[in-house]
C-alpha cells in the first residue's frame, strides 16, 4: 500500500471541493524526477480556470509555467506532459538550474 503524505491529499481534497463548487479545474502531478528536485513524485497542484492554485509541484517559476499550461489544458480539454530541467534552454527561466529534471502531467478534470 502506498502512503500519501498529507499535503498531497490536501491538494486532492481542494480539487474535489473546487469541482463541487462548479469550478473548471486541472490537476498537475509530478510523475518523474531526476537528480535534485524540489518536490517528490506524486506531488499535486490543483489549478482553476482563473489561474488560482493550491498545492505544489516545484516552486518558483516552474509553478507559474505549470499554471499557465493548466489553464490552457482546461480550455482545450486536452492533457499535457510538461518537462522542466537544466538541459532546457529555459532552465534558468523556470527555476531548475540546480541540475534536476521533473515531468509534470497536467490533466483537466471534468464532472
Image (cartoon, rainbow, N blue to C red):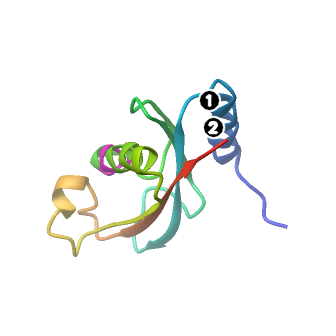
In the image, taking residue 49 as reference, residue 110 lies left or right, namely right
* Image: 100 above or below 49: below
* Residue 49 percent coordinates (x, y): 44, 34
Asked whether disc 1 touches disc 2, contact meaning CB atoms under 8 Å apart, the reply is yes
- Is label 1 in a helix, a strand or a loop? helix
Locate the N terminus by quadrant: bottom right
Residue at point 17%, 54% (across, down): 93
Q: Is residue 55 magenta?
A: no
Give the dominant element type of the magenta stretch: helix, strand or loop.
helix
Real-space CA distance between mark 1 and mark 2, rounded to the nearest whole angstrom: 5 Å
Q: Nearer the viewer, residue 12 or 18?
A: 18
Residue at point 56%, 64% (across, down): 41
Residue 89, by quadrant, is bottom left
* Residue 35 percent coordinates (x, y): 40, 74
Q: How many marks?
A: 2
Residue 14, by quadrant, is top right
Badge 2: residue crowd in 10 Å (few <14, some 14–19, many ≥20) = many
Q: Nearer the viewer, residue 103 or 78?
A: 78
In the image, taking residue 6 as reference, residue 56 lies left or right, namely left
For disc 1, the marked residue is: 18
Looking at the image, the residue that sits furthest to the left is 89
For disc 2, the marked residue is: 15
Magenta region, residue range: 62-66
Locate the C terminus by quadrant: top right
* Residue 75 percent coordinates (x, y): 41, 44
- Is label 2 in a helix, a strand or a loop? helix
Looking at the image, the residue that sits furthest to the right is 1
* Image: 13 above or below 76: above
Looking at the image, the residue that sits furthest to the top is 21
* Image: 58 above or below 53: below
Q: Nearer the viewer, residue 42 or 28?
A: 28
Amino acid at each position: 500500500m502506498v502512503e500519501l503524505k498529507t499535503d498531497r491529499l490536501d491538494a486532492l481534497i481542494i480539487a474535489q471541493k473546487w469541482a463541487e463548487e462548479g469550478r473548471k479545474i486541472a490537476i498537475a502531478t509530478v510523475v518523474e524526477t531526476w537528480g535534485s528536485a524540489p518536490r517528490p513524485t506524486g506531488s499535486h497542484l490543483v489549478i482553476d480556470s482563473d489561474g488560482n492554485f493550491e498545492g505544489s509541484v516545484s516552486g518558483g517559476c516552474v509553478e507559474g509555467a505549470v499554471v499557465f499550461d493548466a489553464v490552457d489544458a482546461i480550455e482545450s480539454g486536452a492533457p499535457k506532459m510538461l518537462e522542466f530541467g537544466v538541459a532546457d534552454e529555459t532552465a534558468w527561466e523556470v527555476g531548475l538550474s540546480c541540475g534536476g529534471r521533473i515531468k509534470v502531467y497536467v490533466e483537466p478534470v471534468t464532472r
